Amino acid sequence: MLMMVVVFATTAVSGQENYKDKHEKLIYENKDFHDVKTYDTDKIKFKKKPENIILLIGDGMGVAQVFMGITANKGMLNIVNMKDIGFSKTQSADHYITDSAAGGTALACGVKTNNHHIGVDADGKKVKTILEIAEENGKATGLVSTSAITHATPASFVAHTPDRGEYEEIAKQLVNSGIDVFIGGGYDFFANRSDKGDLIKKLEKKGYNMYTCLDSVPDNIEGKLGVLTAPKHNPPLPKRGNLLTDATEEAIKVLNKDAKDGFFLMIEGSQIDWASHQNDVAYITMEMLDFDKAIGVALEYAAKHKNTLVIVTADHETGGLSNHGIDIETGKVKGGFSTGGHTGIMVPVFAFGPGAELFRGIYENTEIFHKMLYLYNFKSDK
């Protein structure tokens, strides 16, 4: 029996990680440039502390991926508006090179844990996430991802399990998390489960409006919202269209309706990582540009409302990407890679809004959680 369980778990994980197949595509010339608004942060009178935090995680995004996007968009991205910049060290409790589970847990929970662990410490003990703490303090909460919503990074904010591959268990825990809005793939882990359970019906009984397509969501939607946009992961660009930008706008709109006590929203650009695993410059660049469009939506909201902190960072870098043979005038980029896996280098942290200055410097990835906790004026159990 134990052997059967192990084989099933391994199959589940590998089935969800076939995006790691490396095929090397080193040159890309962008034809889809996007406009960038500029903000003079010295002239925006932000509140002293944020009522809302929007945390955007570019999975696998290092400085090279960011600059690949800057070059491809002829020298300018929305992220360039974020003047308070630092770096986080990403090592996990048991490896110099983290995976997304331990990296996501560090950001979500403020603890170093072992690779593959979700929402638990290195000893397997459950640790509260910033999303759960926000819920306890009356804030509205949300998750958006271009992967399955049960994948490692989003899962780190709503679930607690020693194995990131327990997608059906993560789905079950999300149902009971109290989250107000979630948009991402993973429909099968809720509806077509090995235990024959129907978590979609359970969500509806809990008051969620459930959809499988963003276009089906009414403009005047009231109450909690769940949109499961793919059986497992969402497709890469260009097939999925403007899903990330549209989902970001929808999530902010829903949370803003319940903004009396503020909100917490995590948005993941999952496939920067997948593209880097594949050593595919075209894929990386398109995903980076797509992620930046979502950043633009968050910055526009923050600049208007002045009570919202926007943080952009990564869980780790992937691919050991280098930039060379590029042309910033035409948006043509060329890259090289040192690996098809993750690396241990520091990743950037960008911040915009009230409290942004706290994110300068070099620190452990766990500090991002503690900085958010402090700015929300929440107390830690630890």
Image (cartoon, rainbow, N blue to C red):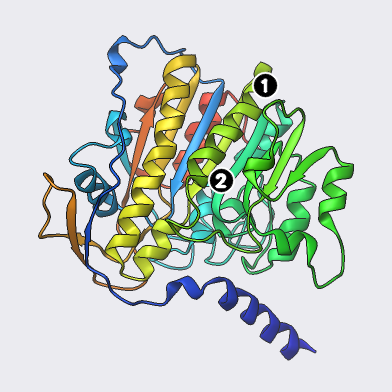
Q: In which quarter of the image is residue 141?
A: top right
Residue toward you, 12 or 362 = 12
Q: Quadrant of residue 356?
A: top left
Residue toward you, 370 or 132 = 132
Task: Please name the residue shown 36% across and 12% down the image.
Answer: 44
Of callouts 2 and 1, which one flags the residue occurring earlier in the amino acid sequence?
2
Say which residue label 1 marks: 257
- Image quadrant for the C terminus? top right
Residue 61's spot in the image, x, y percent? 35, 53
Q: Is residue 83 above or below residue 42?
A: below
Q: In which quarter of the image is residue 377?
A: top right
Asked if residue 382 shows in the view, the reply is no
Residue 323's spot in the image, x, y percent? 17, 58
Residue 208's spot in the image, x, y percent? 80, 40
Q: Is residue 276 above or below residue 112?
A: below
Task: Please name the residue shown 30% across and 54% down the image.
Answer: 285
Q: Disc 1 on helix, strand or loop?
A: helix
Residue toward you, 298 or 122 = 298
